[in-house]
Amino acid sequence: MTGDARTTGRPARLGILLSMAMFVLVVDTSLMNVSISAVVRDLDTTASGVQSAIALEALVSAAFILIGGKIGDLIGRKRAFVLGLLGYAVGALAMTIADSLLPIVICWALIGGIGASLLLPSMQSLIHGNFEGPEQRRVYAMVGAAAAIAAAVGPLIGGFITTFRSWRVGFALEVVIIAAVLSGVGLIRDVEYTGPRRIDAVGSVLSVLGMGGIVLGILVWEEGGDAVLALIALGVLGLTGLAYWLVRRKRANRPALLDPDLFRSALFRTGITAQMLQQIALGGLMIALPIYLQMVLAYNALEAGLSLAPLSLSMFAVALLAGRKAGRRRPAVIIRTGFLLLGIGTAALIPLVPRAGFGWQLLIPLAIAGSGLGLLVSQLNNFTLSPVEEEHVSEAAAANSAGGSFGLSFGLATAGAIMLATLAFSFTDRAGESTVLNPAQQQQVAAALRSDAEVMTNEHLEALLQDQSPEVREEMVRINTEARPIALQIALLLPLLAGLLGLLTSFRMTRLPDPRPSGGDSDLLG
């Protein structure tokens, strides 16, 4: 296929439309997260009910994402893209008019979650099919940058709209953006799928059990629930069974949900690994930093979002710049530089956490880490998917999206769990050494933290201790002041570790031949 054929239809506008679609997909959950208290108040429901809807949306999108890639092959990737957008539009519209929690669960969580499982792989497949060469790298970079900045500024946008207008306005704006994207869908050229069209029912069930079990286990862990290990074990068994089933189907020359030969390619394996590690680092940063800003520096959502602007803006700017100016530089070298900058910026944050008196003191390390993330999002999707042969691009995109979704969920949940566990240990240890608290009070602190550790502001803590003596209140505030930064520092070790592991992976990438667009001798499965 010639480059002219692939880029017919104003590629710059098409790249912008695809970036807008990705922005909506990522910012949607951020809007919901920062609107929880307002939704609870306006709908006269419970916080746990809203949080359950958020968890259900994440679970549905993760559980069906591998199936979503195959559906795109069967019904057409362009049609899957449109249906995914319409699913999101239904969810966003429901949020603007809902008068109870039920339509949110049905429309936003279930229909929107299925929409995400269709939208992510079809979007990556359409980029692969509509662009090639430098143009393809630029569009992958634009879409990656849109996702990155949505994750970073979503809380800021949501906090601003919720504070000064209404949470419903934010979701109404989503509908407007989706309508704008759908108005330009004629620019998209669908690429016909020429592979087998039969459905692998067993593989589909195993993929739902595998991805669903692991993500549900992570969500339960994040919320401090029980049966975490059992759920994750179920997910691991499901994925192990899926791997066995796919290999068996391949040997029998029968259609499968996913071609296992994709993972024989070192390019594909290292690309997905790097994608997952980058998302783990992003997830860890995006839970640790907002908690630090809001619970230690007592910032509101708007102030916290402004303080995180160096991370999001550098991520966005560098991703666009790298997509346009990469030239002949090896993608693996750019990825290695990205992980190096991510590691340096995160490492610099750790000693600053207990010393920074205001958010903008973190400007330089945030800009360094954001620049690293920008380099990564500009290259990783293209590195992983560009050599994939057209027949297998949807399933490759689905696997790539699944790896990224898993990494983000894991980063958010694990960093949060590490933070609370460290806080409980540090708080209990300091309370035990206190000469102000008597043994009964020390025991009470330890018991409370075992059941419900929470990072909170000093003002919130003082309000909870109104019935205690001034000496006890002052001592507890002192312990809280000392324990919180340590918990946040330990939590930041997760994104640092992910960055270092990514750096090691990138050295493996540099020893591999550069990915060549599908159609060349190095095609994956070609």
Image (spheres, helix red, strand yellow):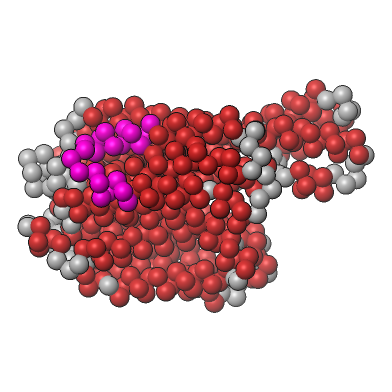
Between 113 and 472, the one lying in front of the other is: 472
Vertically, is 375 above or below 40? above
Q: Residue at x 49, y 55 (%)?
A: 153
Q: Is residue 50 visible?
A: no
From the viewer's perspective, is 354 left or right of 510?
A: right
Q: Can residue 310 be seen here? A: yes
Q: Position of residue 415 (x, y in %)?
A: 54, 38
The structure residue drawn at horizontal position 69% and vertical position 39%, both measured from the top left corner, is 453
> Could you say which is closer to the camera, residue 165 or residue 381?
165
Q: Which residue is painted at 44% across and 39% down in the image?
A: 369
- In the rendered structure, does residue 159 fall within the stretch colored magenta? no
Name the residue located 38 percent from the left edge and 31 percent from the top edge. Answer: 340
Is residue 321 magenta-colored?
Answer: yes
Q: Which residues are magenta?
A: 320-340
Residue most extreme to the right: 469
Position of residue 80 measured from the top left corner of the image (x, y, whole percent): 28, 65
Residue 100 on image: x %, y %: 60, 72
- Screen quadrant of the N terminus: bottom left
Q: Position of residue 433 (x, y in %)?
A: 80, 22
Quadrant placement of the C terminus? top left
- Give above or below for 144 relative to 328: below
Principal secondary structure, stretch drawn in magenta:
helix
Q: Nearer the viewer, residue 313 or 511?
A: 313
